[in-house]
Image: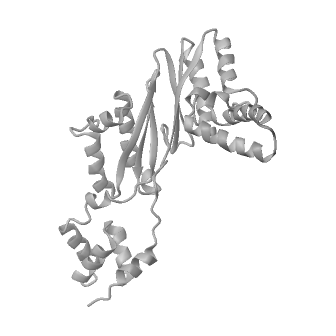
């Protein structure tokens, strides 16, 4: 009987996507023959898409789609960046974005909607593609913005192909100004958001918990200096204003010119356009945010398998 080495197990696991113990058993049942073991796993249903669906998908792409007054951003994940560069995968993500646009970015509605050119849902199409592409894939999230009059600008940072990348931003501007003027401003604002990742659009939209946490830290720092409470109170006002300038979109210094606040940039653009321009929302979506990636320790797996 052939010796079932760790290298042989790893080779079968890489080819099949099955677990370590399943691969070891398949090789033992088939005298170390890789192809026969692959067939054995398939017969047992172990190397199908259902098995792949248990693996962490933290790579992939984000995509945008827009029609002027509305835009959406979606995230579709894969296990590896290699698959994210696959044209077939990219085509799937683009279709998902287009379907999301038709459903106002609503995640549940998009999942259930018909995948373009098929008779099945977006969710079912992605599940089917898992078996075809050979990696776990998930449609993780989608959202959108719209305006009654104006434009929702889109920006992809370091796009791998038009409309696809790993960091996307939407910026909604409500205005009767010329669409080209608005889109140029919106794209610059979106680039700013990509660079600074603000916590909120305005001070009023800041999380009360985050504001209170910051105040507590600043008060304790001020007390350590030995200042009396009435002086500390005045100090905190100034320091909180500085905090807001760091984390609030409209209070931040515009990264494009390095001088004016974002609110002032919008105000100046409105004056130039001869009509009001109102920032009504923004979305910043970065690939893999909040996904806990598994760190594989193959040596530890082998040790556990052998014990």
The image quadrant that residue 146 belongs to is: top left
Q: Say which of 253 and 230 sits in front.
A: 230
Quadrant placement of the N terminus: bottom left
| Outermost residue to the left | 43
Q: Residue at x 35, y 80 (%)?
A: 305
Up/down of 36 relative to 85, above or below: below
Residue 120 x/y as whole percent: 22, 40
Q: Does residue 212 appear left or right of residue 130 in this picture?
A: right
Question: Total number of numbered labels?
Answer: 0
Residue 42 x/y as whole percent: 21, 67
Up/down of 83 relative to 257, above or below: below
Tell me, yes or no, if residue 78 can be seen here: yes
Q: Residue at x 33, y 65 (%)?
A: 17
Q: How is the image coloured?
A: one colour
Q: Residue at x 46, y 72 (%)?
A: 297
Tell me, yes or no, if residue 188 can be seen here: no
Up/down of 39 relative to 28, above or below: above
Residue 156 x/y as whole percent: 53, 38
Q: Say which of 213 and 82 sits in front.
A: 213
The image quadrant that residue 16 belongs to is: bottom left
Residue 76 x/y as whole percent: 40, 45
Q: Say which of 39 and 10 sits in front.
A: 10
Q: Say which of 22 and 180 sits in front.
A: 22
The image quadrant that residue 51 belongs to is: bottom left
| Outermost residue to the top | 274
Quadrant placement of the C terminus: bottom left
Up/down of 57 relative to 145, above or below: below
Q: Does residue 22 appear left or right of residue 253 in this picture?
A: left
């Amino acid at each position: 009987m052939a010796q079932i080495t760790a290298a042989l197990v790893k080779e079968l696991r890489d080819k099949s996507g099955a677990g370590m113990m399943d691969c070891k058993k398949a090789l033992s049942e088939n005298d170390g023959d890789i192809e026969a073991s692959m067939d054995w796993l398939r017969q047992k249903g172990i190397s199908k898409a259902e098995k792949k669906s248990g693996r962490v998908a933290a790579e992939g792409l984000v995509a945008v789609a827009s029609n002027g007054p509305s835009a959406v951003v979606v995230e579709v994940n894969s296990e590896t960046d290699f698959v994210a560069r696959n044209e077939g995968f990219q085509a799937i993500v683009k279709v998902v974005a287009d379907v999301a646009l038709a459903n106002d970015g609503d995640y549940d509605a998009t999942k259930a909607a018909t995948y373009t050119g098929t008779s099945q849902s977006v969710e079912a199409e992605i599940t089917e593609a898992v078996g075809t592409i050979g990696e776990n894939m998930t449609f993780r999230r989608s959202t959108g913005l719209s305006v009654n009059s104006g434009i929702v600008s889109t920006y992809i940072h370091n796009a791998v192909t038009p409309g696809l990348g790993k960091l996307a931003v939407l910026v909604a501007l409500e205005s009767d100004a010329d669409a080209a003027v608005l889109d140029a401003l919106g794209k610059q604002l979106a680039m700013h958001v990509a660079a600074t990742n603000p916590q909120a659009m305005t001070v009023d939209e800041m999380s009360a918990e985050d504001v209170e946490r910051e105040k507590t830290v600043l008060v304790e720092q001020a007390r350590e200096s030995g200042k009396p409470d009435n002086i500390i109170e005045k100090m905190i006002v100034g320091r909180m204003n500085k905090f807001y300038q760091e984390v609030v979109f409209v209070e931040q210094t515009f990264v494009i010119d390095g001088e004016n606040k974002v609110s002032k940039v919008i105000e100046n653009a409105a004056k130039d356009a001869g009509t009001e321009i109102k920032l009504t929302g923004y979305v910043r979506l970065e690939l893999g945010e909040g996904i806990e990636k598994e760190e594989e320790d193959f040596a530890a797996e082998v040790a556990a398998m052998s014990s």
